[in-house]
Amino acid sequence: MKLVIIGNGMAPGRMLEHLLESAPGRYDVTIFNAEPRVNYDRIMLSPVLSGEKNYEQIIIHGDGWYIKNGITLYKGHKIVAIDREAKTVTSDHGVVQPYDKLVIATGSVPFILPVPGNTLAGVLSYRDLDDVNAMLLAAQSRAKAVVIGGGLLGLEAAAGLEAQGMDVTVLHLMPTLMERQLDPAAGYLLQRAIEDRGIKVICKANTKAILGEKKVEGVELGDGRIIPATLVVMAAGIKPNAGLAKEAGLATNRGIVVDNGMHTSDPDIYALGECAEVGGHVYGLVAPLYEMARVAAEHLVDEASTAAFVHSDTPTKLKVTGIELFSLGDFADGEDRHEIVLRDASAGIYKRVVLKDNRIIGTVLYGETADGAWFNDLKKRQVDITDMRDTLIFGQAYQGGAPLDPMAAVAALPDDAEICGCNGVCKGKIVGAIQEKNLTSLDDVRAHTKASASCGSCTGLVEQLMSITLGDAYNPAAVQPMCGCTTFGHDDVRRLIKAKSLKNIYAVMQELEWTTSCGCAKCRPALNYYLICDWPGEYADDYQSRFINERVHANIQKDGTYSVVPRMWGGVTSAKELRAIADVVDKFNIPTVKVTGGQRIDMLGIRKEDLPAVWADLGKAGFVSGHAYAKGLRTVKTCVGTDWCRFGTQDSTGLGIRIEKFMWGSWTPAKVKMAVSGCPRNCAEATCKDVGVICVDSGYEIHFAGAAGLDIKGTEVLGLVKTEDEALEVIVALVQMYREQARYLERIYKWAKRVTIDEVRRQILDDLDKRNGYYDRFVYSQKFAQVDPWSERVSGLHKHEFRPMATIGTADAAE
Amino acid sequence: MSWVSIGSITDIPRRGARCVETPLGKIAVFRTAEDRVFAIEDHCPHKGGPLSQGIVHGTAVTCPLHNWVISLETGKALGADEGSVRAIPIKVEGEMLFLGLAVSADRAA
Ligand SMILES: Cc1cc2nc3c(=O)[nH]c(=O)nc-3n(C[C@H](O)[C@H](O)[C@H](O)COP(=O)(O)OP(=O)(O)OC[C@H]3O[C@@H](n4cnc5c(N)ncnc54)[C@H](O)[C@@H]3O)c2cc1C
Ligand code: SF4
Ligand code: SF4
Ligand code: FES
């Protein structure tokens, strides 16, 4: 009987081994392989690329093997047609070969992005030895390379090219690397490790075009960035190579459709390997392909065989030396699932096991993967882990160990990490003082080091340092944790974000050893604010961690419609502005128009879909967002002051407008409302605001920490300043101090009570250096914050927020 | 029941949601951090808040109006609150999403 095999990859190679073992001589075997070579270990191409191995070392079946087993191998022959009537195949060199049984094992083809320039010289894929040789040649130039795709293949290619001396940038469309195999937390660690080797990583990178005349010169991204490169490797995915089978009239879907005995829709034709689709699944790792090979061999030996392929999850590992990573199964979380997370920030370890009904269904391990096989085994055997639940995550060798130390993250801080920002005291100094001077109380530490002696927000950390240094002898007061995901309180988190230079949400969660993988609705908006405040220009706002009002830049109403409030600087408007508002109200049928308590106009009842169009019209009249929805600067109310009022002492309207124009767009821990009154008669009600100014003959009295909401509280007087410039400076510095120190959702009056009015006065009025520092940091952050969110959205940003994804209408449902 | 294509999973931001308009009202389609997708009515069991506008964490969404937490898998309110919305069958094929919608007989109701 004649057995013909199309493709000579790893799957049919394994199938032949089984066949030769159980029924030698049963078939007369002929193989056609488009690649001009024997069967080699494709998996090991990465070590060949990085120089750790050579081609000879990765050959599975050498030429001698084919001769010994009487197999004819046509190297470099691509089959171009299958004639199922005549039962023959034809190669591109004209060989026509008859078969009794045919096996299609054509593997996959790399997915080439459909962008301009994708056929230029210097654009490669990563699939076979020819690709590797071409990359090695290009690498001799030691020039710049871009790898498109941050999955398994792309990262292995990048590490290999880097090892060959190239300057490599990885472009990845998704927000985190290897998102199919890793959760975002592990993806973050991986990115850090890749970057540590000098490889640049750009996530959310949308490749728009490959540039160059004849040869590649660079890659252009959707946002206009251009990355120079002389080599571009496309590793953006693979697709099953099912074209030949489809032309021959076999059933195909994503791949060649086979039953669990590897039969295609033609009983004499089998398919296996990456080109085959079984039970709706296609595969890209060898373990299941080897299983297909075993099943196919059994059916070739015995047509009545009951051998059947069953789906199983295969663990993924990355073959980059020095990076330990393991991923298995389904690790999405869910209500019926439980997760156990272990993080060890100092060792860079992250482990997560997902359980359902007390059985493992998924595992992600990063940094230490020795227990991967053990978890895989527990999962496969569906072991009930109830009895070892508390220690499961520590691995096989550690059954019975103690739970992790919640203070490990603080213990691991370097000596020069700043603990107290107000007084510039670092960890080493505090620990040193505790030891040398035998300090045992918080007050002693404050007295000797000044740490936590000012605003007090680092008290939690200082206390933790005391327990670490003194052991059980010291018992810190309990801090209220930020939420159920952490043991740290808000103040500690803020301080550690600075001390450890944590610049994204996943970094915070890893380094501070969060006990959940993606946080909750309490901690995410808070972390997002802290990062925006602390790293202006560096941190990319995470919109999915914002409440809806801040995400769509309007206020949600009880019926799901929105209200829109444009800025009216200092509460001053004009006929032109009022006319524009009237037009918008008419055009969009806005049901309610109301004057707000903050001296501006609110349009209520706007449909979400209409928001961008409403903003576009308002924008044309010169309006920008009033941030009436924001934890940020809201309004600056004013009275008419010296412009019109006979009692006015200063230009209160002018100062109000000036403050509002200077400070709009800034995000704050909670909303900030201000007012400026032209004399102590206080018509602008400045003495119940977060920040208020009462103008007097001799200057400007600055007030703060008032409240007129759930609580009612008159303001405190910060002090009197002589000039308008100084008033602005003091107000800006005050707000910046609040921005840097307060807990998320904490209004100014609550924060001020905590840090004391005297401390605020000391830092803002008395200490000029401090004041200037705050002022400068606010001004810097405004560079990134003062962008009108409405006009950004009118020009298309986040369009998805405002449009339904689909509209399903049916004739019979029409009313 | 019939499966209706509504677009690609990549149309929805991770830890986010989009709406689908149907003759029966809005359906909110969610995508979690780990690319699981769910569909429920866009109508909070408390006072009808648009759930598609909430913050998505794990496999739950927090309603933007009064912070009820609704399970995306069952549509039930979690914690102390009681109530539920209808969960709509959804399937993923490759990147494409399909909603399982009742045929017109059900619609008459
Ligand atoms: C760089 C790299 C690293 C990898 N790392 C891993 C890993 O760590 N772990 C893991 O499990 N898997 C890994 N894989 C995947 C694994 O190598 C593949 O799943 C496996 O090799 C697929 O085997 P196959 O026999 O289905 O197809 P292939 O090995 O692709 O073989 C198909 C062969 O068919 C030939 N062919 C195609 N069409 C025709 C035609 N019309 N006529 C004649 N011949 C034809 C092709 O030239 C090719 O040689 C990696 C893959 C690559 C490229
Ligand atoms: S606060 Fe004083 S200056 Fe301003 S309007 Fe009232 S009375 Fe006039
Ligand atoms: S006072 Fe209460 S009811 Fe009135 S707008 Fe404010 S929150 Fe709503
Ligand atoms: S309407 Fe959803 S919580 Fe009230």
Image (spheres, coloured by chain):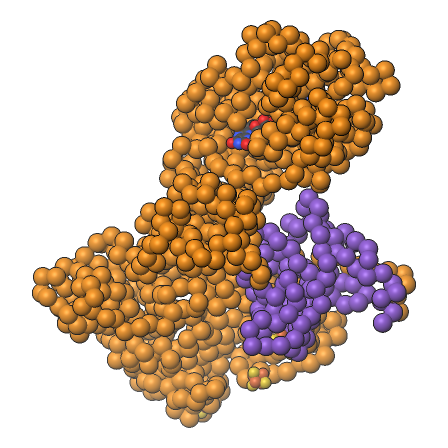
Chain colours: A orange, B purple
Q: Say which quarter of the image contains residue A587.
A: bottom right
Number of numbered callouts drawn: 0
Q: Measured from the top left, where is residue A425 in percent x and y?
A: 21, 62
**Residue furthest left as drawn:** A437
At a point 60% along the width and 6% down the height, the residue shown is A67
What residue is rendered at 85% in x and 15% in y? A86
> Image height check: is A574 above or below A2?
below
- Asked whether A731 or A419 is in front, the reply is A419
Quadrant of the picture in which ligand 2 is shown: bottom left
Q: Quadrant of the N terminus of chain A?
A: top right
Across and down, in percent, residue A53 comes to: 43, 20
Residue A194 visible in the displayed image: yes
Q: Position of residue A4 (x, y in %)?
A: 72, 16
Foreground pick, A104 / A90? A104
Camera-side residue: A750 or B77?
B77
A59 vs B26, left or right, is left
Residue at image x 44%, y 73%? A745
Up the image or down, A59 lies above or below B107; here it is above
